[in-house]
Amino acid sequence: MTTGPEALTETAVGTRERAKQDLEVSIVVPCLNEAQSLAQCVDEALEVLHTEGITGEVVVADNGSTDGSPELAVLHGARVVHVAARGYGSAIRGGVVGAYSEFVVVADADGQHDFADVPKFVEKLSEGYELVIGNRFAGDMKPGAMTFSHRYIGNPLLSGLLRFLFHPGIHDVQCGMRGLTKTAFDQLDLRSTGFEFAAEMVVKGARHKLRMTEIPVVLRPDQRGRPPHLRTVPDGLRQLIFILMCSPNWLFVVPGGILLGLGFALVTWLFVGPQHVGNLHLQTRTQLFGVILASIGFDILSIGLFARVYSYSEPLRSQRRSLGRALKAVKLEQALALGGLFIAVGLIGAAFEFALWVSRGFGNFPDDSALIFWSLWFLIGVQTCFSSIFLSMIGISRGTWIGEPT
């Protein structure tokens, strides 16, 4: 029994390198108190390797079990890697690091996966694919294997959103049975610790342009006789937020730009004069609402740009460079000049309205809508200046984009 990949000695590393030359596949099974189903999984995996004539190993990545799962795994012929960091993603990451073979197939310990599918993953990896994801919907899904909400709401929604944003060609992003090469695993630099690990692997696979494919797999009812570790709503929300975080354009830039445009349009429309829409009479109060929309939109848009610059040199960065080229083409002094122009326009306009007020003997203010209009220009100008400075600070610290010397 090993003590985990972080404790590998030089001798152990040498043993591992020799073992890698002999093994065709390592089957990694993440485990946390799975005594009810783990023995069946290990037995099935070893039987498939023997029957198919595949030289391989079964690695149980134990995540702190207290029900005797590690001892049971060893008794049935598996090798155990202890992973101290808690979480589904942490367990898989520790198991893959501790695996000896270049080809790795991951399958959950709940008994839902049919290990007879392992040879199909090995075949695809042998063909040169670097990441192979199981598709439970295209395979044989047994009655009772997946709840209605997961089958018809959660999985289609999350997988569909990820396909729309990143185009990986994968239709079952959350499938727990998947194969990959150790080389691809090192390249992906996976970070998440929870169930969003599955989405992170696919997102980064698409971003790194790995050779990916999917294959149909069998899904059986859970064999553990207890509720799963997966929490439908909290873990589903974590995956949704993670997917959106990986696409700051859609999370920040697009909605921020829309709100900014709507706000500016509304303020400008009412600057011309009061407007009538049916029985509605729109004037300065509605115009103030437009200022709020524009300000919120600008703040959201700025956060999106901050996120894009910050994540540019991170593994989650996008390979699509359109916004990157635009930001890199803009220098700090140009952004400050633009902000200064907005401020000047706002101040000049406000000064003109103030002069009119003075000329009329400080009576009723001549035009509230005009003052709101010019105030918006001033507000956006100030935000542009300070956002540009912060954007430049991030860019310089990350070694990318705005703020680079000419």
Image (tube, helix red, strand yellow):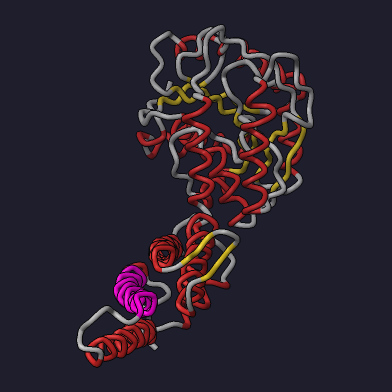
When the figure is inspected, residue 318 is found, relative to residue 147, above or below; the finding is below
Q: Where's the C terminus, which quadrant? A: bottom left
When the figure is inspected, residue 13 is found, relative to residue 389, above or below; the finding is above
**Place of residue 217 in the rendered image (x, y in percent of width and height, measured from the top left):** 74, 28
Q: Nearer the viewer, residue 177 or 4?
A: 177
- The reply, left or right, for residue 127 in relation to residue 291 is right
Please give the name of the residue rendered at 38% of the width and 28% of the height, measured from the top-left corner: 86
- The reply, left or right, for residue 289 in relation to residue 237 is left
Residue 396 visible, this angle:
no
When the figure is inspected, residue 6 is found, relative to residue 219, above or below; the finding is below
- The reply, left or right, for residue 125 in relation to residue 317 is right
Name the quadrant containing residue 8: top left
Query: Residue 392 colored magenta?
Result: yes
Q: Where's the N terminus, which quadrant? A: top left
Q: Nearer the viewer, residue 404 or 344?
A: 344
Name the quadrant containing residue 250: bottom right
- The reply, left or right, for residue 136 in relation to residue 295 is right
**Place of residue 124 in the rendered image (x, y in percent of width and height, measured from the top left):** 75, 41
**Place of residue 358 in the rendered image (x, y in percent of width and height, measured from the top left):** 22, 89
Prevalent SS, magenta region? helix
**Place of residue 310 in the rendered image (x, y in percent of width and height, measured from the top left):** 40, 62
Q: Nearer the viewer, residue 237 or 10?
A: 237
Q: Bounds of the magenta span? A: 367-396
Please give the name of the residue rendered at 36% of the width and 28% of the height, measured from the top-left corner: 84
Residue 167 visible, this angle:
yes
Please give the name of the residue rendered at 64% of the width and 35% of the height, measured from the top-left corner: 178
When the figure is inspected, residue 296 is found, relative to residue 86, above or below; the finding is below
Please give the name of the residue rendered at 53% of the width and 71% of the height, measured from the top-left corner: 323
Query: Residue 248 colored magenta?
Result: no
